[in-house]
Image: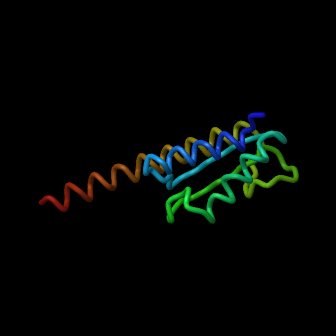
Amino acid sequence: GVTKGLVAERLLSLMKQKGKLPDFVLCVGDDRSDEDMFEVITSAMAGPSLSPIAEVFACTVGQKPSKAKYYLDDTSEIIRMLQGLATASELAARNSISQLSFESL
């Protein structure tokens, strides 16, 4: 009776209850059991469970019909995507620190 969609729904609900609306959601999956999760996070964009500025990415692995908006070919593409996100996050953090340092002068 537990699906990935129910788990995603529960996580979003718990975060909302704690007043912490997510502004970034990434779900990656490669089979039918992931489709409920993709549907939940996509429909959450229209509701109160996410920050108004939330970025939501549903990615299926392998070219096939899916409720996910994005496709990755294989696990090596997942790794490249995660490395790119890490790099972008590090650059954003450095820029924020630089901006704070500059403003304090």
Looking at the image, the residue that sits furthest to the top is 1
Depth order, front residue of 28/49: 49
Task: Name the residue at 75% across, 38% down.
Answer: 3
Q: Where does the image place residue 39, in percent across and percent down from the top left? A: 74, 53
Q: Where does the image place residue 19, in percent across and percent down from the top left? A: 43, 51
Q: Is residue 105 left or right of residue 39?
A: left
Depth order, front residue of 52/30: 52
Of the 4 image quadrants, the one containing the N terminus is: top right
Looking at the image, the residue that sits furthest to the left is 105
Task: Name the residue at 12% across, 60% down.
Answer: 105
Q: Where does the image place residue 90, in percent across and percent down from the top left? A: 41, 46
Q: Would you identify the image quadrant in which residue 56 lies?
A: bottom right
Depth order, front residue of 32/98: 32
Q: Is residue 59 above or below residue 42?
A: above
Figure label count: 0
Q: Where does the image place residue 84, in percent across and percent down from the top left? A: 55, 47
Q: Is residue 98 left or right of residue 58?
A: left
Task: Name the residue at 66% across, 53% down.
Answer: 41
Q: Is residue 27 above or below residue 50?
A: above
Q: How is the structure coloured here?
A: rainbow
Q: Is residue 1 above or below residue 46?
A: above
Task: Name the residue at 64% across, 54% down.
Answer: 57
Q: Is residue 8 left or right of residue 71?
A: left
